[in-house]
Image (cartoon, helix red, strand yellow):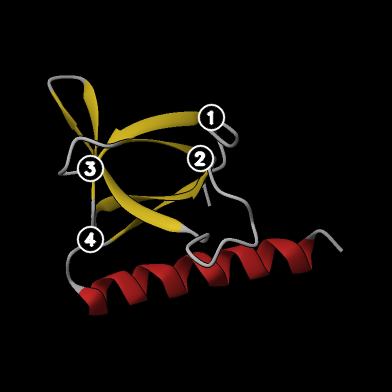
Amino acid sequence: MNEEFEGKLISVEDEDGNQFELEFIGSMEMDGREYCLLLPTDMEEDDEDFGYIILERTEDDGEEIYLSIDDENHLNSVYDSFMALLYDEDVDSE
């Protein structure tokens, strides 16, 4: 997993115009696309909605664009790949 931007904060806007700040955890390439693993910075860890957010990262005219993954099966596949990478890194660091 690429951790080059680990800890970087990004701001995203949803379709309703709400702004969210997310912490970059890591990224990986899968099937020729780049995916980012993020955590919300404005929630407590015990909040029922707290959890990883996975977005596809693309560029348009040099500007980073983060897109949601609408296909649930594809999202689950990307999530499983991220979890495998995180688990492998935890095992390697012991």
Residue nearest the observer in this picture, 51 or 5:
51
> Picture quarter containing residue 53?
bottom left
Question: From the viewer's perspective, is residue 58 above or below residue 93?
Answer: above
Callout 3 crowding tier (Cα within 10 Å): few <14, some 14–19, many ≥20:
few
The dot on residue 24 is 2
Q: Identify residue type, mark 3.
A: Asp
The residue labelled by disc 1 is 8
Return the disc, 4 or 2, that comes first in the chain's sequence. Answer: 2
Marks 4 and 1, how far apart at CA: 21 Å
The residue labelled by disc 4 is 69
Q: Identify residue type, mark 2.
A: Phe
Residue nearest the observer in this picture, 9 or 49:
49
SS for callout 1? loop
Marks 4 and 2, how far apart at CA: 17 Å
Marks 1 and 3, how far apart at CA: 19 Å
Q: Nearer the viewer, mark 1 or mark 3?
A: 3
Marks 3 and 4, how far apart at CA: 13 Å
SS for callout 2? strand
